[in-house]
């Protein structure tokens, strides 16, 4: 018999705060909280993401944390390649969700409306200015 979505699943949603009414945090490794749901039943708990302050390896550490919590479904915005490898090795399926409340993301997953992430996003960055100089078209730049 096929397993229905939500049955015997432990679902993690990355969040900006500790409640299901908070917004989904799209940054997996740097999210503030993981909201862990026991299937569709609605029981949940918030786990603070201790990896968010790491200089490097936040995604890997975050992936290890939710694997230790026996999560098998992750709802988030994006996952870098190193974290994706850890999640895949742990058997955790990853689904992309948008800028909605945590409870709405869970509902969308249960309705099978979220796309599964089958390849990782690009590696995260740390808010730097980048290496390019742009078009160097500052104030007063003239094309003539």
Image (tube, helix red, strand yellow):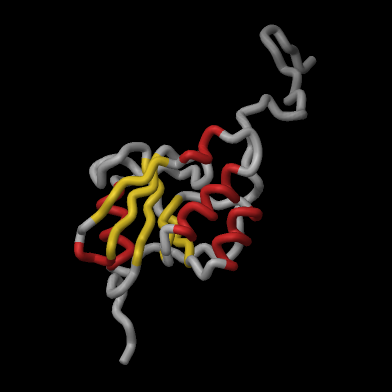
Identify the residue shown where x is 60% and y is 63%: 119
Q: Is residue 110 left or right of residue 122?
A: left
Residue 103 on image: x %, y %:
25, 52
Quarter of the figure with the C terminus: top right
Identify the residue shown where x is 49% and y is 47%: 28
Q: How many marks?
A: 0
Along the viewing direction, whichever of 66 and 13 lies nearer the viewer: 66
Seen as rendered, the residue at the extreme right is 144
- The answer to whether 87 is drawn above or below residue 22 in the figure is below
Seen as rendered, the residue at the extreme bottom is 1
- The answer to whether 120 is drawn above or below residue 89 in the figure is above
Identify the residue shown where x is 58% and y is 42%: 58
- Tell me where residue 43 sits by quadrant: bottom left
Q: Is residue 83 left or right of residue 131?
A: left
Q: Is residue 62 left or right of residue 134?
A: left
Residue 64 on image: x %, y %:
54, 55
Quarter of the figure with the N terminus: bottom left
Residue 51 on image: x %, y %:
53, 40
Identify the residue shown where x is 29% and y is 45%: 101
Q: Is residue 27 left or right of residue 127?
A: left
Seen as rendered, the residue at the extreme top is 140
- Tell me where residue 113 sits by quadrant: bottom left
């Amino acid at each position: 018999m096929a397993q229905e979505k939500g049955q015997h699943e432990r679902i993690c949603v990355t969040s900006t705060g500790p409640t299901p009414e908070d917004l989904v945090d799209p940054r997996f490794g740097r999210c503030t909280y993981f909201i862990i749901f026991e299937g569709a039943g609605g029981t949940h708990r918030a786990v603070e993401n201790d990896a968010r302050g790491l200089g490097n390896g936040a995604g890997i550490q975050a992936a290890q944390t939710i694997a230790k919590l026996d999560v098998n479904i992750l709802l988030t915005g994006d996952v870098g390649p190193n974290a994706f490898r850890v999640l895949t090795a742990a058997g955790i399926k990853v689904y992309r969700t948008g800028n909605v409340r945590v409870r709405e993301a869970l509902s969308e997953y249960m309705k099978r409306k979220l796309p599964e992430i089958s390849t990782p996003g690009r590696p995260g960055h740390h808010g730097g200015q980048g290496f390019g100089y742009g078009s160097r078209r500052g104030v007063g730049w003239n094309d003539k």
